[in-house]
Image (cartoon, rainbow, N blue to C red):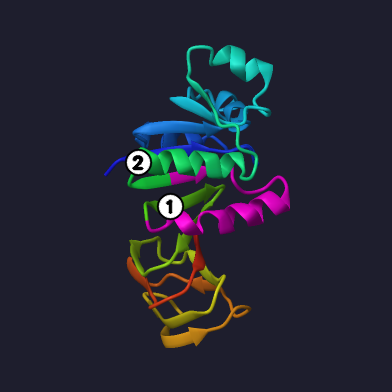
Amino acid sequence: MSKALLICNGEKPGAWLKKLAREADFVLAADGGADNALAAHITPDAVIGDLDSASPRARKAFAEVPFIRVTRQDNTDFEKALDWLTLQKFDECIIAGATGGRLDFTLGNFLSVYPYLTKMNIVFKAKGCSIYPLIKGLKFSARKGARMSIIPLTPCKNITLKGVKYRLNGADWQLGQTGISNVITAQKTEVLFDSGYMLMYLED
């Protein structure tokens, strides 16, 4: 599987970003995300967007890095980056720096990934946690005692949770119902559902 790391212009990621960069096949910065890459001493493979946010300092530091200008103004730099990664047929996208900062951007980013989930696996990384946008079930390994939450963003049908303290078995949840601060009790954990869109929060 080919894995991309997408660095955005939200809160500044910590030292853990360098580990994500080492594990990625390709590092893409979304416009002002170039400054987050620079702060973390990471040289991206490319920078993309309408290119109105990357600072002169980042442009100078990354003079040898391709800057891909996308002129359309009816979507965000984040979406421009996802469009490009989809065209390059990456299988997985790890997103850093897409939370924090302006709340409208954070919420928008969580919703913007929905159309791309049929094309690649996506996970948001932030300090101390991962956030998985899901349109299908997920089996994963996690630390026992870690907190996890599920937050449906649309009605979700036939939700089943295994390997957690508070289990579900075939529950139908409407928008507004949430499962906050469940606890991982088994190394192998499952979130299963038939239809809908939800976010799963998982503590590191």
- Residue located 57% across and 37% down the image: 14
Q: Residue at x 55, y 45 (%)?
A: 79
Q: Amino acid at mark 1?
A: Ile
Does residue 43 lie above or below 197 as drawn?
above
Q: Residues within 10 Å of mark 2 (few under 14, many from 20)?
A: many
Which quarter shows the N terminus? Answer: top left
| Residue named by callout 1 | 122
The spot of residue 25 in percent (x, y) is: 34, 33
Query: Which residues, given as a range, are shown in magenta?
Result: 94-118
Left or right, residue 7 beside residue 135: right
Rendered view: 104 above or below 57: below
Residue 100 in percent (x, y) is at 67, 48
Percent x, y of residue 150: 52, 71
Whether residue 42 sits left or right of residue 175 in the image: it is left
Q: Secondary structure at mark 1?
A: strand
Q: Is residue 16 visible?
A: no
Q: CA distance from mark 2 to mark 1?
A: 10 Å
* Mark 2 lies on residue: 3
